[in-house]
Amino acid sequence: MSISEDNGQPLAIEVKDVTVSYGDTPVLQNVSLSIEHGVMVALVGPNGAGKSTLFKAILGLIPTDSGEIYIHGLPFSKIRGELAYIPQSEQVNWLFPLNCADVVMLGRQRKIGWFRKPSKLDREIVDESLRRVGLADRRGALITELSGGQRQRLFVARALAQEAHTLLLDEAFSGVDVASQEGLMEMLTSLTVEGKTVLLATHDLTNMSGRFDLCCCLNKHVCAFGKPSEAFTPEVLEELYGTHAYTI
């Protein structure tokens, strides 16, 4: 178990000196992060910075060359639903014939078991999760009928049904209009108030200031980690985006 703690309990996410390579090409180099419970963290960097690779490493989907990763003090192989992943919209087959309730019920699968039917409690949790993200009236709608913002909220509902305490969102604002972005941010903020932890990867700096508790600036290594007002220095922005960062 990780010895680092937040108020007497293990940290939500702890990444210790993690290096990941694809073949001979290093993608992440000595990345370290310590994220407490109940905070909203932006993972910021240009395309190719390693944001998705870091997520895959945290999720146990790819091996690391070195380093250690803990979720609530445990390696991914030993956690039981504490972590939920919300992928990039383009990574999802939206043509699959599922309705909203079906998608959210997938979040209950680990607790239900593969050959058992959902109980009344499971169905109540699904309905409550849909209500919390504002999709109660779309319960029976096919996912093909949803807008980009509704699809992202649907995956948050699945995470809620899973009873996850830590959410990873990969480019959640991609293809989502500004109004939907605002609604999604408000919803995620309300989850952190309840003690849940949100790590959101983005390359968009537009809404950073004042929207996140912390910001991790990543470009294969951690360039800065702290409050947005402290992390976004001219030097860090240049390290992330080059000399044209001054125009951002």
Image: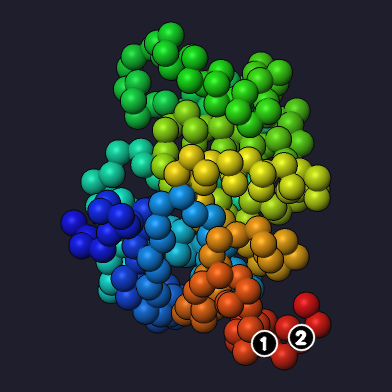
Q: Number of labelled discs?
A: 2
The correct choice, above or below, for 188 with respect to 29 in the image is above
Residue in the picture at 52% in, 81% down: 223
Instruction: Give left or right: position of 174 versus 193.
Output: right
Residue type highlighted by circle 1:
Pro
Point out residue 230 in the picture as x, y percentages from the top left corner.
Answer: 58, 77
Q: Are marks 1 and 2 in contact (CB under 8 Å)?
A: yes
The residues tagged by marks 1 and 2 sit, at their Cα atoms, a distance apart of: 7 Å
Looking at the picture, does residue 20 appear above or below residue 154? Answer: below
In the rendered view, does 3 fall on the left or right side of 180?
A: left
Around disc 2, counting alpha carbons within 10 Å, would you say few (fewer than 14), some (14 to 19), or many (20 or more)? Answer: few
Image point (80%, 50%), residue name: 178
- The label shown at residue 234 is 1
Residue 131 percent across, percent down from the top left? 62, 23
Secondary-structure class at tag 2 = helix
Residue 248 appears in view: yes
Q: What residue is at 52 percent from the left and 44 percent from the top?
A: 193
List x then y, in percent, for residue 15: 35, 66
Q: Nearer the viewer, residue 227 or 148?
A: 227
Q: For mark 1, does the 10 Å Cα neighbourhood hold few (<14), some (14 to 19), or many (20 or more) residues?
A: few
Which residue type does callout 2 highlight?
A: Tyr
Identify the residue at horizontal 45%, vertical 44% (top origin).
Answer: 195
Q: Against 212, is 198 above or below?
A: above
Instruction: Classify the position of the N terminus by image quarter.
Output: bottom left
Q: Which residue is labeled 2 in the image?
A: 246
Q: Residue 39 shows which numbered tag?
A: none
Residue 63 visible, this orientation: no
Does residue 99 appear to the left or right of 80 in the view shown? right
Does 30 sit left or right of 129 as displayed? left
Quick one: label 1 or label 2, which is nearer the N terminus?
1
